[in-house]
Image (cartoon, helix red, strand yellow):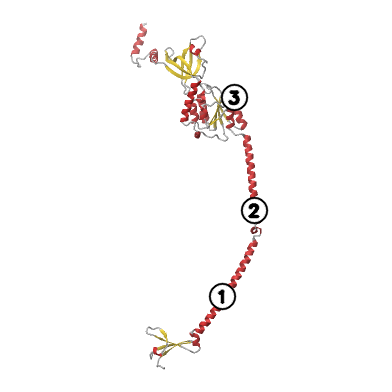
Amino acid sequence: MSSGTEPATRAAGQASSAENPWPVRTVARKIADWIHRLGAVWVEGQVTQVNARPGTSTAFLTLRDPAADVSMTVTCPARLLREIEPPLRDGASVVVHAKPTFFLGRGTLSLRANEIRPVGIGELLARIERLRRLLAAEGLFAAERKRRLPFLPRGIGLITGRASAAEHDVLVNAQARWPAVAFHVVNTAVQGVNAVPQIIRALSRLDADPDVDVIVIARGGGSVEDLLPFSDEALCRAVAAAGTPVVSAIGHEPDSPLLDHVADLRCSTPTDAGKRVVPDVREETARVHQLRDRARRALHGWVDTQCRLLDQLRSRPSLADPLGPIERRATEVETQRERGRRAVLTTLSREQAALASARARLAALGPSATLERGYAVVQFSDAEGNLKVLRSVSDIADGATLRVRVADGAVRATVQGHEE
């Protein structure tokens, strides 16, 4: 006995190396010793795979983190599960007081629970309310970030349970309103521990599909625990980050999971979602006919108005007899031209007579007429060489040159003496 344990003891006391490796049992024992020194902890999670066989003293269950793909095995006395009312079922939220335990033979880690407390409805609602305030403070509920649905989507993505009433309600009501609507249906779990990861994967796949313009997440009514996945923080953030508008159609009118506040459109029921994602072909056809009739009446009214305007314009004298005013104006122009010609001729005759009268008076008063009667004008040059009229014999001296102007010309003469 001692010969078998001495090598292991020596190996445990030395550092491992390629030449001196530790046996598996030594490594497992060291891990177990370290884990066993850890204290007990309170752990919260969702219960999956409850295994409590009749006649056994130990029960097994899996505790899963709802916000991440992480789970751990939990062992506990079977009486703990039998004492819980109502009995635990998959998807229930619990708080477990357990101590980490490493099973040496199998090399597995589990939690050894000595107390299990189901999370009550009040606690769940309080947690949902705290998460609601957190998401609202981050702006995920803000109305300005919500997008409008397209009028007629090319394709509609539908995330719902397989062969569920919610799927039937959405498809039937949407196709009744618009028979040509195209759906891309992805069936997922809508309650329990697998619901959130499956819905997130489906949402990511439909969001990446270019033929999908709207995504509908639908589920029928249920209890608060059944609708817990639709208040999950990871799902709410995934919907807020989606590039495609998301419609929430969860439960009935009173139900209001957090997904309703994050989605771009909240529908009270899956039936309501089927009516709101597509237009009604009958209503749209009637609206088209109504608009066509309104357009026809408007066009006829406009044409009638223009026809009346043309009739009014055509009845005006200027358009009824377009040449008459021109002819009348031509006559008036000719009359005014003749009056102007006569006025000009009259003025010219009057001015010509006045000019002739002035010319006659000038001729009578001028020197020319006197010269024609035999008179002459005698001029002499003064000291500066200017010609002046000789008015007195005292103005000229003997021998001076005179200019004698008669009617038909002038002659030069020389002064030879004076006569009084």
Numbered mark located on residue 399 in the image: none
Q: Which of 281 and 304 is in front in this view?
A: 304
Q: Residues within 10 Å of mark 2 (few under 14, many from 20)?
A: few
Residue picked out by circle 1? 348
Q: Which of 17 and 154 is in front in this view?
A: 154
Looking at the rendering, which quadrant does residue 211 occupy?
A: top right
Among the two numbered marks 3 and 1 on one chain, the one whose residue lies closer to the N terminus: 3
Give how far apart the Cα atoms at labels 3 and 2 are.
66 Å
Q: Height in image: 244 above or below 108?
A: below
Residue sitting farthest toward the top: 1
Task: Judge depth for marks 3 and 1 and give the one in front.
Answer: 1
Q: Height in image: 179 above or below 419?
A: above
Picture coordinates of residue 400 (x, y %)?
39, 89
Picture coordinates of residue 286 (x, y %)?
64, 37
Residue picked out by circle 3? 165
Location of the N terminus (image quadrant):
top left
Residue picked out by circle 2? 310
Element on which disc 1 rests: helix
Element on which disc 3 rests: helix
